Amino acid sequence: MARQVILPKLGQTMEEGSIVEWFKQEGDEVKRGEILFTVESDKATLESESPARGYLRKILVPAGATVPVLTPVAIIARTMDEDISELEGSESEAVAQALQPEGVMREDVMREGVKREVVEREGGRVFASPRARMRAREHGVDLGLVVGTGPNGRIVERDVLAYVEGRPKATPMARKVAAELGIDLATVTGTGIGGKITQEDVEAAGAPVAVPAPAPSLVPAAPPVVAAEVPMSGVRAIIAQRMVAGNTVAAPVTLTIEADATAFVALREQLKTRFAKELGFNVGYNDLLIKLVAHALREFPALNAQLDEAAGVIRRLDAVHMALAVDTERGLLVPVVRDADRKGLKVVATELRAVVERARTGKATPDELGGSTFTITNLGMYEIDAFTPIINLPETAILGVGRIKERPAAIDGELCVRKMMWLSLTFDHRLVDGAPAARFLQYIKDLVEDPFLWLAATM
């Protein structure tokens, strides 16, 4: 009996995906579990297997197309002459609707209120999800100004909300006048309450200003030579969106502290020797830091929290899911070790290497790259001392780890050489104040300097 192949839902937050490549053609024989195609979400590219054996009779969604999850993408039949007209006919309309350009609508869809507008901007159409368009209408946002981070650059709901958070505050009349005069509100200084831009501010900005003619240049400047162009799309666009949100939506503050890591380094050397044969790899500093910080978060739950702006509450979380920022060919990714505070060091080290490897090869699932409650970013291997990491929203804070370097230090009045390490904590001041954040960072310093304080409870 013929059956459909649907686009799988690869994570709790996945709403749509793009077919990257078909490995079988129409008419090819397929086996159950054999790779049919690869699908890309906004976080990862994964392989999708055939749910049955038979023949690939019909490909409904071509490579490069983006459709919602659970949309039929192909039909598999037991034989080449089996009648598939009923399946093909029943699904063709749904698939066609998912593939059609936005703005092309049927009358019955219009009546249901699922309106798909086509927004024109220089260079072509802007594609956005229905929820993104709904949010844009609510907030009066021109989708032509929003950077999309969904598959193939599609604008999704979070893109619109991030744009709304970042745009200047202005009165409705100020926005109307600015649109009429062609003035960018980002260039206008507001004098209203709370810095809000008023109509008078816009009109003042639009008043003609005498500009002296520039002095003639004796030597015309040569245009810069472009060596290469890198598309601002896919994972790169998502990273850009999140980095901007971490600095504009949050209220980031960075604290730094220097820790004596001599005992920490000695502990790592002992564990590396002790478990190398059993684990098949050397226990690393990131393994220890994940366990150490997870322990600290249990003592300071205010740092293991997220802000729900819609409900107006700060949610302190019971689970401690630790993420580690990892450099990959696809860009910066944050694979997650879940319930790190409840797992032993050897389990954490093993799981971390597995999920990092899947992230670097593009095989990590969306759930393995999301849902973290705290992030660590380590630049010590690049000889970086201290830096200002950007918060991985919606988390409260992120810990930056610098290199371990021998430096002179005073111990009990005596000058000696110690292995020192800088720690940088960036936190969202909306959720936690400076003093609790400072105590949290100081506690991490204490655990680095005397790691046996937490190690006994983690083995």
Image: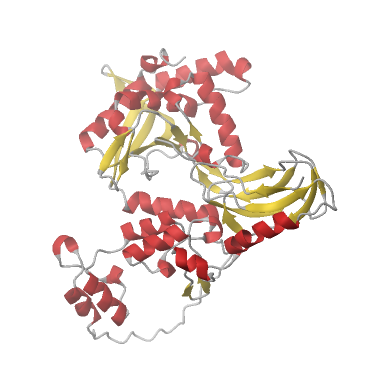
Instruction: Give the residue at x 74% y 41%.
Output: 52
Above or below for 96 versus 372: below
Q: As drawn, is 17 to the left or to the right of 395?
A: right
Q: How many marks?
A: 0
Corner quadrant of residue 300: top left
Q: As drawn, is 225 to the left or to the right of 267?
A: right
Question: How is the rendered protein coloured?
Answer: secondary structure
Residue 407 seen by the camera: yes
x and y, in percent, of residue 362 in the image: 61, 43
Closer to us: 446 or 422: 446
Closer to us: 288 or 23: 23
x and y, in percent, of residue 94 in the image: 60, 59
Closer to us: 178 or 111: 111
Above or below for 333 versus 272: below
x and y, in percent, of residue 129 in the image: 48, 60
Q: As drawn, is 119 to the left or to the right of 245?
A: right
For the N terminus, the image quarter is: top right
Q: As drawn, is 96 to the left or to the right of 367?
A: right
Above or below for 304 versus 412: below
x and y, in percent, of residue 182 in the image: 32, 79
Closer to us: 243 or 9: 9
Instruction: Give the residue at x 28% y 48%.
Output: 251
Instruction: Give the residue at x 44% y 28%.
Output: 290
Residue 61 seen by the camera: no
